[in-house]
Amino acid sequence: MDGTGEAPARRRVELVPVAPDEAEMRLDRWFQRRFPGLGHGRLEKLLRTGQVRIDGARARANSRLATGQVIRVPPLDLSPRAMPAGAASAPVSAKDAAMLQGSVLHRDPLVLVLNKPPGLAVQGGSGVDRHLDGMLEALRFEAEERPRLVHRLDRDTSGILVLGRTRKAASELATAFRDRSARKIYWALVAGVPSPRQGKIDLPLAKVLGPGGERMMEDDEAGKRAVTLYSVLETAGRRAAWLALMPLTGRTHQLRAHCAFLGTPIVGDGKYGGERAFLTGAVSRKLHLHARAIDLPHPAGGRLRVSAPLPTHMRQTWKLLELDPEDSRDPFAE
């Protein structure tokens, strides 16, 4: 720090890898997020002169990023954000801090695991001012660094969310998600009962724009491969089924699109299931999709296994349908 209390300007070239939570972000927004003091005009000049590059190649402000790409960041005459990417722009309220700290399922010197509540966005975006990425300071505890996101969940999906408590731990955890050594199990309630009751969905998905905004649709030519294992755990007659889902790939809205493809949309998912996704009676209209459990390599060695209890609205539905929310079966165990 200098006498003003600000960090000194960056005086050397840095090669910065794109984190999983930055995938599909525009390059200019990546810079805005990491280096808010860098104006757009200055960034455009750096791009025109080739000083900013992606994997060694020239780039444009609207270039879309992919996890693992390396961005060349030249020396910058500004004071970079002292906190890691996604720092909060405002103090975290006492209410939000208590909520986040109360959601911690596991904490050790390298890893935090949260039970993310439904309705909380992981990152900001258009019209999204309140998000987890902006409240990570509340989860620092005694650590020197703020925790870092290593993967994402949809805003309305609840459950397991893993954070790295150091830069190195976050990098190793992100690698586990990227190379699929992290094993994730989701629970969902779907409208109807899929046939067969257990199987594999291998359906390529591509993002399309429509009246309701972006959504993932089947596309054999332009789509990226998306694979999900599913198994029915219990049924409520023919009205609904409780599914265990294990994604083998990590596409946007993969589980939601795949369940709709089976003809059994996730309850509460009007985007992919329309009115059929909403059950009559006292069943909540919120999305019934929960990241239930994870098993992944721990940065210090061995494996970390954590499970997350259902959110309130899903527990109420399980009670209404006489399902057991404490069921610990793993239909995908080898």
Image (spheres, rainbow, N blue to C red):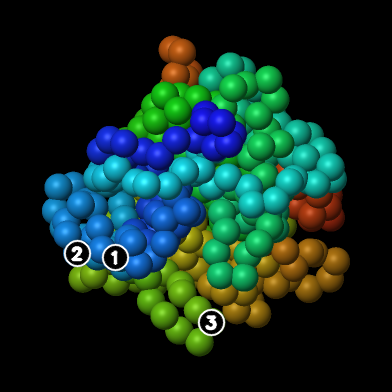
Label 1: few (<14), some (14–19) or many (≥20) C-alpha neighbours in 10 Å: some
Residue 288 spot, x, y in % from top left: 67, 57
Residue 252 spot, x, y in % from top left: 44, 59
Q: What label sits on residue 44 in the rendered view? A: 1
How many numbered discs, if any?
Answer: 3
Q: Which callout, 3 or 1, points at the residue further toward the start of the chain?
A: 1
CB contact under 8 Å: marks 1 and 2? yes
Q: Quadrant of residue 224?
A: bottom left
Q: Is residue 122 visible?
A: yes
Task: Report the front residue among 95 and 152.
Answer: 95
Label 3: few (<14), some (14–19) or many (≥20) C-alpha neighbours in 10 Å: few
Residues at marks 1 and 2, CA–CA distance in whole angstroms: 6 Å
Identify the residue position indicated by label 2 in the image.
Answer: 48
Residue at 75% from the left image edge and 68% from the top image edge: 285
Residue 143 spot, x, y in % from top left: 62, 21
Residue farthest front in this picture? 3
Image-based side of 192 in relation to 223, left or right: right
Residue at 42% from the left image edge and 62% from the top image edge: 39
Residues at marks 3 and 2, CA–CA distance in whole angstroms: 36 Å
CB contact under 8 Å: marks 3 and 2? no
Q: Quadrant of residue 264?
A: bottom right
Q: Which callout, 3 or 2, points at the residue further toward the start of the chain?
A: 2
Label 2: few (<14), some (14–19) or many (≥20) C-alpha neighbours in 10 Å: some
Q: What label sits on residue 212 in the rendered view? A: 3
In the rendered structure, which amino acid carries the disc numbered 2? Answer: Arg
Q: Is residue 328 visible?
A: no
CB contact under 8 Å: marks 3 and 1? no
Q: What label sits on residue 69 in the rendered view? A: none
